[in-house]
Amino acid sequence: MDFGFTPVMEQWQQRVQAFLDEVVYPAEATFYEQVAAQAQSNPWGRPPVMAELKAEAQRRGLWNLFLPGERGAGLSNLEYAPLAELSGRSPMLAPEAMNCAAPDTGNMEVLAHFATPAVQRQWLEPLLRGEIRSAYSMTEPEVASSDANNIATRIEVDDDELVVTGRKWWSSGAMAPECKVAIVMGLSDPDGERHQRHSMVVVPLDTPGVDVRRSTHVLGYTDGPHGGHAEIVYDAVRVPRENLLGELHRGFAIGQARLGPGRIHHCMRLIGMAERAYDLMCERVQQRVAFGKPLAAQGVVQEWVAEARIRIEQARLLVLKTAWLMDTVGNRGAAVEISAIKVAVPEMATWVIDRAMQAHGGMGVCQDTVLPELYAQARMLHLADGPDEVHRMALARRELKRYA
Amino acid sequence: MDFGFTPVMEQWQQRVQAFLDEVVYPAEATFYEQVAAQAQSNPWGRPPVMAELKAEAQRRGLWNLFLPGERGAGLSNLEYAPLAELSGRSPMLAPEAMNCAAPDTGNMEVLAHFATPAVQRQWLEPLLRGEIRSAYSMTEPEVASSDANNIATRIEVDDDELVVTGRKWWSSGAMAPECKVAIVMGLSDPDGERHQRHSMVVVPLDTPGVDVRRSTHVLGYTDGPHGGHAEIVYDAVRVPRENLLGELHRGFAIGQARLGPGRIHHCMRLIGMAERAYDLMCERVQQRVAFGKPLAAQGVVQEWVAEARIRIEQARLLVLKTAWLMDTVGNRGAAVEISAIKVAVPEMATWVIDRAMQAHGGMGVCQDTVLPELYAQARMLHLADGPDEVHRMALARRELKRYA
Amino acid sequence: MDFGFTPVMEQWQQRVQAFLDEVVYPAEATFYEQVAAQAQSNPWGRPPVMAELKAEAQRRGLWNLFLPGERGAGLSNLEYAPLAELSGRSPMLAPEAMNCAAPDTGNMEVLAHFATPAVQRQWLEPLLRGEIRSAYSMTEPEVASSDANNIATRIEVDDDELVVTGRKWWSSGAMAPECKVAIVMGLSDPDGERHQRHSMVVVPLDTPGVDVRRSTHVLGYTDGPHGGHAEIVYDAVRVPRENLLGELHRGFAIGQARLGPGRIHHCMRLIGMAERAYDLMCERVQQRVAFGKPLAAQGVVQEWVAEARIRIEQARLLVLKTAWLMDTVGNRGAAVEISAIKVAVPEMATWVIDRAMQAHGGMGVCQDTVLPELYAQARMLHLADGPDEVHRMALARRELKRYA
Amino acid sequence: MDFGFTPVMEQWQQRVQAFLDEVVYPAEATFYEQVAAQAQSNPWGRPPVMAELKAEAQRRGLWNLFLPGERGAGLSNLEYAPLAELSGRSPMLAPEAMNCAAPDTGNMEVLAHFATPAVQRQWLEPLLRGEIRSAYSMTEPEVASSDANNIATRIEVDDDELVVTGRKWWSSGAMAPECKVAIVMGLSDPDGERHQRHSMVVVPLDTPGVDVRRSTHVLGYTDGPHGGHAEIVYDAVRVPRENLLGELHRGFAIGQARLGPGRIHHCMRLIGMAERAYDLMCERVQQRVAFGKPLAAQGVVQEWVAEARIRIEQARLLVLKTAWLMDTVGNRGAAVEISAIKVAVPEMATWVIDRAMQAHGGMGVCQDTVLPELYAQARMLHLADGPDEVHRMALARRELKRYA
């Protein structure tokens, strides 16, 4: 048992930290200015500065860090965790700048494991180079998607084609002109066994029958510069059978495999978001004076600071241990911990960010800080990839088995 | 002691309820459609349906209910409370439709009490008729405005004119073309006694030197159809001395007097917002099925429902008692209770709305329900009109005096 | 709607307040000294001072205030509520001094409504005069008694006798020599309809077969001076059939009827206990100095004070409204509110008392204040008369029916 | 960074676990029976079984594990942490059985570092052998001892003697016949610099002038079998000057040095107490049936289980990291973390134990489980060794310095 970072981990962290300090933070203002400037002309597209950030990240070798194996940086989950955390400090810019943003990360993993070489050449390669973006179509508006058995979208085999019919939403990123392809989960064998009913398929977004209808917001945010969150109707969309990922009717397992790393990546970034909020809070309360002294001298504010530090540290340690478990006993062996962080980290993050907002007064809820946008993202993660309630239930059931 | 509503109160409630059911709720979709349609052409203006709602409210005698005395409906605070609550169930439409929306309500009260007859003719009369809208310029970006001594905007006497110089923000509504006038608080005697340094003055927004710069958002929402929240630079703005409200250097007391009713009105509406969220939550969990049964059959969801009901009821009773106290012993005698509700009601409301969001899954954070917009408004009220911390401090100090 | 106390209510409150100030508070130290002195000789008996308090309460006409009708003081629930609250400020002394302590209150109500005249003469009359004490045997150690269907104790008819067989615990008061009789709930028709299986019977504690085994504690408290909480084995205990309360197999409904007032009485007293803790906290923080100033000047302590005041006020209003509802629409019509206060009031009380303990430092958890004993009582009420979870579930189900 | 236990750590844990399973748990019932049996004859003494447990622990080499260096087991803080946690699973028996119970552990450390060889021979040696017990007299009833500057007890030099005069309380263990000596902190130079005013001295309890007055309880518990918590009056008590610990007027630093390990030991044991409560809760809810299914199938209960697991894991990781920091950068370098765990762990533990109590119904608050006694201990640790508020303040001030 050793809580110290290895020299290799420290070196990686220094490189990402330098990228943040030298490149990302200075670009944040530009990012928002460009987003505002293109609000009418290109509301769902990346602002030009993103391309520059990506080029610089690639130049520095900070690219595809999330991806294990030779296609990525070869980092373990434990090694990647503090880097993802750092990227979360500037969550609108840094993850994408390093080609480590959801949902592309999960999609690239799935394509790397389950796509045919031809599909990999067509879609995985440009994604790995950051030339295009992708979406993941799982959630549906009409059913509670936390229970996969509710999924109603159909994927039917017709000779050498697959036919996709259904309505999906929260397909994040799909409003963007850069987004070219979606991975879609659907029901291919409604009468199959519980976890052998679904298939997963690659659908180019320019296929006839794909109708990207509108974007859902998160609180008041469109997430425009990241391509929003699309509602997509798939109306008898035909793709070649080779677009199937893995085996027919085995999509559920792929979805589960995709979610493990996806959930921990979200949690890692949330730690960074909480640290960003914490920094902003501490700076603010040192500067702001009311009733004759800095807010930092108020006992109530000190309680927020202390509680925030205590909660962040605990959450980070649990995330790091979970990453270590995934590395040592596998995602399945870390199931309790993955559910645990999926509950604990958003809870910590929304609390810390909310206190930082409160410490800023009116400034804390408006566009003059990143805080409300961080809040919206953290709040969303009480729901995305499984709501808190479902994770608590799953965790408890596993634990209680030991006492049956 | 009697917890029953009087027949008069019940009758008023039925009339407002009927207005909601017959007129307001059916207009909500139209409201948002018109807002979207004029997003480019008139981003800060009212959608046309608002004029229709106002006409209908006037026709039904549901107009200026907030205002005591002969200019209004002659209701006590206790009588008005449940009506304001009802208006909070559709907070974007109903309060303004009945000419009972902040900040106009507070401004009208101030004008009615402290303006000269000429100023009343010019500004109060059209406000009472709902023909124009007004703003209140108190908060400043550079200082913690929860401590009035921090206010830096200057109001100087120059012969028969007053000269206003400073920067204000969160002047809600002032982006709107309908908004014609602001009430501005500033420092007129920096060396005066602590509460005798400020003056309050009426400033028409077309006066030279008034520069409405931009609007601040609330958790991503622009509050466009209500004129946003303006940052305004007052650069040596000159108005006639008769635009002074009350006496010179006595503006602090006017501000305090304005805040009592303002705070309770906010709280009344928040109760209604919480009830709206509660209704949406209960309807949703009865309809939505996961894991083989409606969400309403899940113990965790039942806990949310029970806790929400318990919290709303307690908050409502405290608001009603506070209104009754204001009616019987005056705003000053109800100071502890006003601080109490200003803390308790936003806390209750953000919790209830947040649970309703959670119960809706992804739908709960997007534009498909009013929930996230309600959340933003409730969250703002942890800060507006005094942050929670300051009210708790004030309340505690008053209480602790009894034990000194 | 009127939040003011009527002159009659105010007069009653002044009389009870005077009794507290002049008689009860001055006797508290004596009470604990006498309890300590008789710890070996009479560990479950009343200390002598209790008889003096009772005599004085009777002299002052503060006797059986809880009981509606001519046998009691003729007060409504709403009139009694603030008096029960006041008695809760000295919960070890005042309720019993005024013959208003559980479980005798509930037992007297049941006897008054459902016993034959002969049984009333034998047991109700001495209880009303405060000459003896009684117990209520419902909960059983082997089953979850929150679900009445679990009750396993049998009550069988044998000619003109009833035979009681089973094991009960938490029969509060039954360890005391003064306690002469118990009301026992048992299963008389196991195959009857769900709520028509139980009977309720009066069992003198000196009947052969009654074995009072031991007492359970609450946290570390024996509740010795109130007769503890007895575990009682009823081994084929025979009583005459006239000891039956109400009709055969209709005991469930009597139990429910008993619980409504019982629960609100507990809540009323809890409000008083919270107020006592609040007073102690405020006095303490005004006197105690640390880091150069009274604790009362610390922001964190001010938050406790403010929150405690806010929570107590809300809880009290909800209890008062519930009492008013019970008076106006009946116990059944107030079911949601009774469940609501049974959850909300213990939650408020444990929080307030816990903060008062914390404000006292080490003194707050030891016998130098009443705080830890108050805490134990309040904690118990998260369980007694139905655990929080069951009340929340019941409340939610009732509410959700409106949305089905 | 490695979250796995080393083989050496695992081996130690297996040995302590075996001691618990084979010796301690089976002795728990005997312990409580013997305590009850000697309640009159020896209310503050150890029950006989304790000597047997100690002999067995010594035989197994599980003795003085807390003590670094050659006198103890030579374990680091990180190595000791999981062993202390295990001992916390049976906190009344296991820590003392292994001679690892407070306050002796801290006293032995202080004597080992700061006492003269003669004093060590007289007092440290028998303590290390477990033959006698000791007390620590720091807290005073009249002042807020969380601020060391408040300490009023005087230690005056009179030739070759030291004269101690003052009143202390919460001198845990000092009621026991086995307790022979106290370490006393007092003011020796009232005009010295802030942290150079105090001295620390060894006082045999049979010295003339030492008056052990009474014991304070914790939530109704006397902690009798551990010698209670004594209030002691030191009335001009004279001891030889060689009884001074360290240098004159340097007692404050010794006290601080003593507290670091003391606090983390408490936290380690609290983790074990929380795990014990968790086990009891999970077993109970699997067995207990209500409303037709085991409590474990209720969503609300599952939430308790999941939250408890999440909170325990996070707290444990923070404690382990703190131990590792103490080992690697020293107690001073771990100051923020020590304050963090001193706040976070009692908060976690009281919550988990409280939920376990609730899951047990009436059984959970009485003597039929260890839960309420665990609760009392955990609750006490929100105050002992510095109240939560003071630790949060200290932590926040350190953190905020980085932003000044």
Image (spheres, coloured by chain):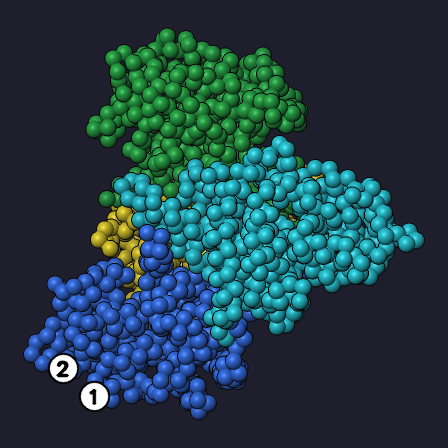
Chain colours: A cyan, B green, C yellow, D blue
Mark on residue D118?
Answer: 1
Q: Which residue lies under the disc numbered 2?
A: D240
| Letter of the chain that mark 2 sits on in the rendering | D
Q: State the image quarter where residue D372 is shown.
A: bottom left
- Amino acid marked by disc 2: Pro
Residue depicted at x 43% and y 61% = D344
Q: Is residue B319 left or right of residue B400?
A: right
Return the residue nearer the eye: C93 or B21: B21
What residue is shown at x 13% (from left), y 67% (from top)? D189
- Is circle 1 on the same chain as circle 2? yes
Q: In front here: B84 or A100?
A: A100
Q: Is residue D94 above or below residue C323?
A: below
Between tags 1 and 2, which lies in front? 1
**Mark 2 nearby-residue class (10 Å; few <14, some 14–19, many ≥20):** some
Q: Let me know if residue D145 appears in the view.
A: yes
Residue located at (30% from left, 25% from top): B154
Residue C130, position in %: x, y? 40, 52
Depth order, front residue of B242/B397: B242
Q: Earlier in the sequence, mark 1 or mark 2?
A: 1
